Amino acid sequence: MKKVFLPLFLGILLTVFGCQKETPFFKLTGDIPGLSDSTVMLYGLFSVPDSVIEIPVKDGKFSCTLPLDTITPMYLRLGDSRMEYPVFADKGVNITIKGDTAQLHRLTIAGGKAQEEYNAFQDSIAHLDNYIDIRQEADSFIVKHPQSVVSIYLIQKYFVNVPYPNKSLIESMIDQLSGYMHDNHYISRLQNSLQKQTSRDKRLQMPALPDTTGKTIDINEYKDKFIILSLWASWHPESVEMQDSLQAIIKKFAKRPAKFVSLSLDSHGEAWLDTLRSHKWGGLHLCDFKGWNNELVEQTETQDLPTLYIANTSSKIIATDMWGKQLENFLDNQISNWEELQKKRAKEEKKRKNRR
């Protein structure tokens, strides 16, 4: 059976309720005058963005204390701005964030060895405007810092999360990391992320699968539609949260050429159906009760949950693991471009007919 990586924050939140006095803590404090009184969000580097810790903001100030046992790469997201900042949390570390809303791209984030290493890297690329040069600087950092978790973050950002990632290059970078880093579970998550990224440009060949009524559905019959395929399971809390997060987007695209399909890796029908009944989710729900032995799982080489694939009208996978506003914007752009192309083709066809 393939490994399923439970979300980072599940462990954190459980620890919150059972922590002892000797539990090591990480503290984050922020002071950004002018920041609206809402919330900022904190989530793990390899977690679903919708699985977040929300931190209330009052008069531009916010703070959060978490029990941690090891260094944990996170993202900080500032409310409606959708701007994200890497934060390298660790036990006994206090990270401070300062700045103002007029220059959110220039926040000062300080505290802890890893954070200072990342800040030094940012300083080294501040004068660079060529992406190739920035990647070379990232490569240089990784070579010089084989024991730093920042290296994992840089591999993820500059070499994995790019169009057409070079798998052999990335694997050689991972090999360069120290043995200590290879014992870190983030290496496994990085490799899983790479696997998903290299699945892009493959064709999504959906097998015919039963829906909630037992009727066999052939997704390949949905011509001229973008397919948004999410893999989840009722026994996996984070993927259940993912299904919840998709509902607003499903409603927004109800009249657009998009088909939302949820494939459950449940092996017991009642658990699957009970979850669907209690949540009343939209979209098309399928399950063959084969769990990880599902044909589509094997085809896409999916390694963890939750996972999401986006395929265009030609069934070509064009993106993976987008959530929330990022998914919404991506779909809107892709579908709008496709619709404009269809209008253009229709006009050209009409002109050809009129010339006959």
Image (cartoon, rainbow, N blue to C red):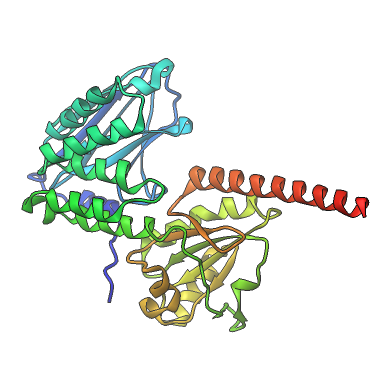
Looking at the picture, tell me which residue is in the foreground, 149 or 34. 149
Residue 76 in view (yes/no): yes
In the foreground, 176 or 306: 176
* Residue at left offset 36%, top offset 63%: 305
x then y, percent, for residue 166: 31, 52
Is 57 above or below relative to 352? above
Question: Does residue 12 lie above or below 37 as drawn?
Answer: below
Q: Quadrant of the N terminus?
A: bottom left
Q: Is residue 242 above or below residue 326?
A: below
Q: Position of residue 247 (x, y in %)?
A: 56, 55
246 on left or right of 332: left
Taking depth in this image into account, of 70 and 183 the one nearest to the observer is: 183
Residue 58 screen position, x and y as percent: 38, 24
Q: Is residue 152 rendered to the left or right of residue 330?
A: left
* Left or right position of 225 against 102: right
Number of numbered discs on residues: 0
- Residue 62 quadrant: top left
Picture quarter containing residue 266? bottom left
Q: Give the quadrant of residue 141.
A: top left
Rendered location of residue 105, percent (x, y): 38, 23
Q: Residue at x 12, y 49 (%)?
A: 176
The residue shown at (60%, 72%) is 219
